[in-house]
Amino acid sequence: MGRTAVVAGTASAVAGGVSARQTKKFNEGQQQAAAAQQSAYDQGLADSQAAAAAAAAAAAPPAPVAAAPDLMAQLTQLGQLHDQGVLTDAEFAAQKAKLLG
């Protein structure tokens, strides 16, 4: 009977150790899976932010810098035509308003 108790106690201790190791491995696996999922989420978020930034840059209208010299050139040309008498005062004023308006 004493021998049975020792064997049973040893089996119980071994089973407890195995159970503890399995629980530890399971918890480590869960932590690794959660870390991988978070990493994938972070990468997806970074990718979507980069795509949004690229789309915003592509959709941005061109800078109106080129329009300013062209406007000045057109106004200068209108002034010259007016000075030469090709345009009347009314025509000059109408074209100028159209360009500036």
Image (cartoon, grey):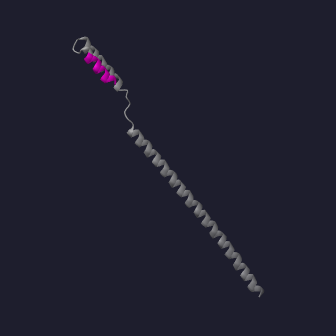
Dominant secondary structure of the residues highlighted in magenta in the image: helix
Considering depth in this image, is 91 or 42 the residue closer to the camera?
91
In percent of width and height, residue 95 lies at 28, 21
* Direction from residue 74 to residue 59 in the image, left or right: right
Considering depth in this image, is 10 or 80 the residue closer to the camera?
80
Judge whether residue 93 is colored magenta: yes
Residue drawn at x 64%, y 66% as measured from the top left? 24
| Residue 70 visible in the shown view | no
In percent of width and height, residue 58 lies at 38, 40
Give the number of marks: 0
Q: Where does the C terminus fall, quadrant-wise? A: top left
Considering depth in this image, is 13 or 77 the residue closer to the camera?
77
In percent of width and height, residue 45 lies at 49, 50
The residue lying furthest to the left in this view is 86
Residue range in magenta is 90-101
Quarter location, residue 17: bottom right
Quarter location, residue 29: bottom right
Q: Is residue 51 above or below residue 28?
A: above
Residue drawn at x 56%, y 59% as measured from the top left? 34
In percent of width and height, residue 12 lies at 70, 78
The residue lying furthest to the right in this view is 2
Q: Where does the N terminus fall, quadrant-wise? A: bottom right
Considering depth in this image, is 65 or 13 the residue closer to the camera?
65
| Residue 63 visible in the shown view | yes
The residue lying furthest to the front in this view is 90
Q: Is residue 12 above or below residue 78?
A: below
Quarter location, residue 53: top left
